Amino acid sequence: MAEAAIELRNLKKYFNVGKGPGGAKAYAKAVDDITLTINKGEVVGLVGESGSGKTTLARVILRLTSITGGQVIFNGVDLAKASRDDMKKMRTDVSVVFQDPASNLNPRETVMSSIMRPLVLHGTSKAEAKQKAIDALGLVKMDTRYLYSYPHQLSGGQLQRIAIARALVMNPKVMILDEPTSALDISVQAQILNLLLDLQESLKLTYLVITHDLNVIRYISDRIAVMYLGRLVEYGPTEEVIGNPRHPYTKGLMAASPILNPHDRGKEKYMMEGEPGSLINLPTGCHFNPRCPYATDRCRSELPQDVRISPLHQVACFLQEEFSIDK
Amino acid sequence: MSNDKNELLRLDHLCVDYKVKDGYLSAVKDVSFTINKGEIFAIVGESGCGKSTIAHAILRLLPEHNEVITGNVWFNNENINEYTETQLEKVRGRQIGMIFQNPLDSLNPVYTTGSQVQEGILLDNVSREDAWKKVIEIYKDVKMPDAEKRAKSFPHEMSGGMRQRVMIGMMLARNPQLLIADEPTTALDVTIEAQILKIIKSLRDEFNTAVMMITHNFGLVAEVADKVAVMYAGEVVETGTVFDIFDEPKHPYTTRLMAALPRMTKAEGRLQTIDGSVPRLTEHKSGCRFANRCTHATEQCKTQDPPMREVSPTHSFKCFMEQGVDING
């Protein structure tokens, strides 16, 4: 049995969007009742349209924002009840790389001082931190002459390497990558994806990769999690989710993703109509029912629960209940 | 001049040089290609390769006094690069429409979107009522949900997909022969992207509008393009039908790029990468611009400009190697 690196149990994050004092209470349910497990050494891809709560989920796991309900269990420790020491350890064990490297590296700091910063904050001596920064730069295959460069002197791909080096410098066990390649050109994207996979194998890392690019997700991940309006609609092994998507939303998403072979053109495609709704005025029942061609009265009134259709594959859809293996 | 009556736009040795501090920067060098009526023509390349510059040079939308455009732009057999500003005004919008990456930058925030679409129609001496009816018609053409209500919406009340529909509608209102779409779906989600692509395709099918699509996304190209020009550092290195480019790329750059696309899973192997980086374009050097990154480069490549070789009437590439490179080699 694989060991869990991160376990989410009924995780909720609601944002209060009520209209001032005396106004009606309203919530944006950015993460709504999500249960999922990421095993050690696994690469999990998280996909969904913009506004589906992907980044909020990452921020909740990192405890960059508080939890409304549910649990985040990291290496067996419930973070809500964790002691200060546990939290401190957790912050070195989980690191993050954000989407736009240019906007989250300090423009007035050299590459070296950016990479050293987390070490220094955690009490490493300057000399040791410098050595570790040099090592980290080596890991991301960059020459040490860049140590004294400033962010504006580097290209997008180089900046992303620096961001990865900074994330690696604390020897994390888990890395959360938020759109790691969406700001990059294809040839640079290939370099970064290869680098991430090499690092994952050599350092035995666990990744949670957030992206809207399905071709990237298919290439890099072992399992795919699909979110729609704050809810996890499907979670399963990459081949199963790509090859045989079970949730109607996943089907629509797969069909909409750009093909990379012109010979696949003209195949009859199921085109999803409409646009994702808002997290504030959610429909009753399944969140996807207004866009779902198979929606029944039950879908419009009841919220579907996760149905397990194979040991590692779960779907939140009433239509899949007959395939459940739990019965 | 060409006598082919299908021909709509032909670039003939187009060069664009920007004046910079230390001389000239050659952003577009010696680009020639033809777009036929009703054709979707994709220009694809990485950032900074000059693909948007070409589009802006055609309509002369580049910052004034800063650039030198040489070469000919044949549109309906007239060289619009020699047009005066007044003459060109009649071409912009009416004959060649353009949509950009971020529709929010192109829409006026203080007018309703409908009135902005109407503005273009009113230029043709139509009464206000008729023009408004046309606006509603156009909104329905671009599959805008709830057309009557949306025509009275302001840009901030709309989603990104709807705004891009407005932009396409604005172009449609003047019924241009050529639509230049500069990264039309980059800011949108894949599901909305698929809907916008469907509209662009139906434009071509219903009105025989030619589309020049500028993108860095090979997925889009594979999805809609008929013909493709691949650009690298200001030069077109390969042109062909979409099948020529995807099935039998010949130029080393195109070949490597195809191998860098994530078309497989990690179990099947690693993606190919292209080492090195794009050269600075300020020095007017001769020689192949890809030479410093090309694994096949010889001394000749560094000093002489490679010739354009024809593989078939539709497919050509710019390289010294007669056979080009095989996609598997």
Image: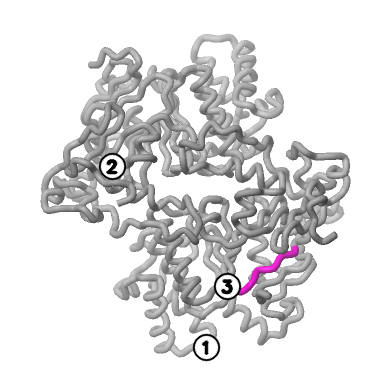
- Label 2 neighbour load within 10 Å: few <14, some 14-19, many 20+: many
Disc 2 residue type (three-letter): Lys
Give the residue at mark 2: B250
Residue bearing the label numbered 3: A41
In the rendering, at what x and y percent does residue A191 appear?
40, 60
- Between residues A88 and B287, which one lies in front from this camera angle? B287
Residue B174 lies, in percent from the top left, at 49, 18
Q: Secondary structure at mark 2?
A: loop
Residue B113 location (% of width, % of height)? 60, 29
* Image location (x, y in percent) of residue A111: 39, 72
Residue depicted at x 68% and y 75%: A1
The chain holding disc 2 is: B
Question: Which label belongs to residue A123?
Answer: 1
Please provide the residue range marked out in magenta: A35-41
Report the amino acid beneath label 3.
Gly
Few, some or many residues within 10 Å of mark 3 (<14, 14–19, 20+): many
Q: Are tags 2 and 1 found on a single chain?
A: no
In the rendered structure, the answer to whether residue B127 lies left or right of residue B98 reads: right
Answer with the quarter of the image where residue A154 lies: bottom left
Mark 1 secondary-structure assignment: loop
| Foreground label between 2 and 1 | 2
Residue occupying the point 38% across, 63% down = A158
